[in-house]
Image (cartoon, coloured by chain):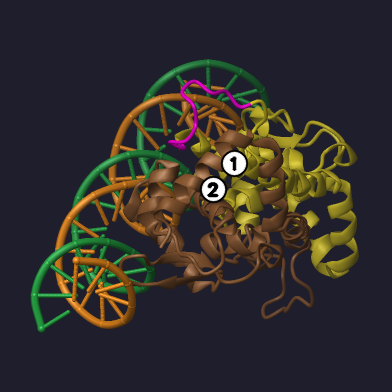
Chain colours: A brown, B yellow, C green, D orange
Amino acid sequence: MILKSQVEWALHCCAILAGLPEGRYLSTKALAELHGLPKEYLSKALQSLSQASLVDTTLGPSGGYRLARSPSEINFLDIVEAVEGKARSFTCTNIRENNPCRPAGYCDSKPCAVARVMWEADEAWRNTLKAVRLSDLVGTLSEEVPADIWQGTFQWVLQRAG
Amino acid sequence: MILKSQVEWALHCCAILAGLPEGRYLSTKALAELHGLPKEYLSKALQSLSQASLVDTTLGPSGGYRLARSPSEINFLDIVEAVEGKARSFTCTNIRENNPCRPAGYCDSKPCAVARVMWEADEAWRNTLKAVRLSDLVGTLSEEVPADIWQGTFQWVLQRAG
DNA sequence: CAAATTAAGGATATATGTTATCCGAAAATC
DNA sequence: GATTTTCGGATAACATATATCCTTAATTTG
């Protein structure tokens, strides 16, 4: 059970977009350069964010991406689900139905007890992600990343933001 | 991020083994028939349980698998990790190191803030699984599965247990 | 208006992982 | 000695993840 690397990419890109001044856009090219990622493939992750309405886009030179909402209104789960999908990590194939001792046509009233536990764990995972906002991440980063790197990065970004 | 179907299989098999009388073994063949699963491939899942010391095995006719510990001493996480591995679902590739604004040779004091959140969610998932014991599952099943199916199944099993 | 730049999306290729099957070896039972 | 079992290795089919390339349409810049 492994998340796509695109999840990591999308989270880091959103952290950068969160620090972008109002009304400005940052291109795939700049985001790819900043993180050392393959531009064309990173583009797919950003398209996922766009389809999930987490970011706005605009075309042409000076075009690119910006957050569609305030960083305090976007949480980790939003971003993870945009890239990874909303499907649960455990899928129940109802193998209890294959039990040769079951009467033909018997119908279960509840979902399988095994699946219920696995889904509960899945929900705990999602709730943890939902509880952390993008603004929290930015707060942590601005505290932990040395000031010169932090400021230098956004200076670098602003030179490339349309 | 999707768990292998072997996780589902292993959990259901353990639930059956939990109901096996002291000292008796159940074969891959019987477990595969009971759940309608490919015998050879199910065997791999059971081998994982064996390598994790969750089950004991014995060879020859009347051989097979039994739990190595009491059902109250085995939890969901034990079984899931035996099949799926203990690796975290999110792997941090440290893309912050690719930031062109970082001074050469700069070393981070803490793991990436993005990774820490993802790992926290992973731990919440694991803690939920750890909190549910195999004995809890058996308790739920014995309440919810109609008595005739429940008893019929273990009668079927006992005819095949060595 | 023309040229350059951008996001979006389709097509394709490669690598990796999951799902499965088959076989041989060693051990236990009968 | 014949049968049954677990265990491990080898292999193949299939799905998914990763990555690249190309076309199209929209937008900005000159």
In this rendering, would C14 be left or right of A5? left
Q: Are marks 1 and 2 on the same chain?
A: no
Examine the structure image and report whether residue B100 is included in the region drawn in magenta: yes
Quadrant assignment, res A103: bottom right
Q: Is residue B62 visible?
A: no
Badge 1 element: helix
Please provide the residue range marked out in magenta: B99-108
Q: Quadrant of residue A142 in the image?
A: top right
Q: Tell me the residue that label 2 is attached to.
A: A8
Please name the residue shown 69% across and 36% down the image. A144
- In this orientation, which residue lies closer to the viewer: B151 or B79? B79
Q: Chain of mark 1?
A: B
**In the image, is A83 to the left or to the right of A58?**
right
Which label lies toward us, 1 or 2? 2
The amino acid type of the residue labelled 2 equals Glu
Q: Name the spot of residue D24 as percent of width and height, x first.
A: 20, 79
How far apart are the alpha carbons under marks 1 and 2?
A: 30 Å
Q: Which mark is residue B45?
A: 1
Callout 1 amino acid? Ala
Q: Is residue B61 above or below residue B147?
A: above
In this view of the protein, which residue sits in the foreground, B126 or B83?
Answer: B126
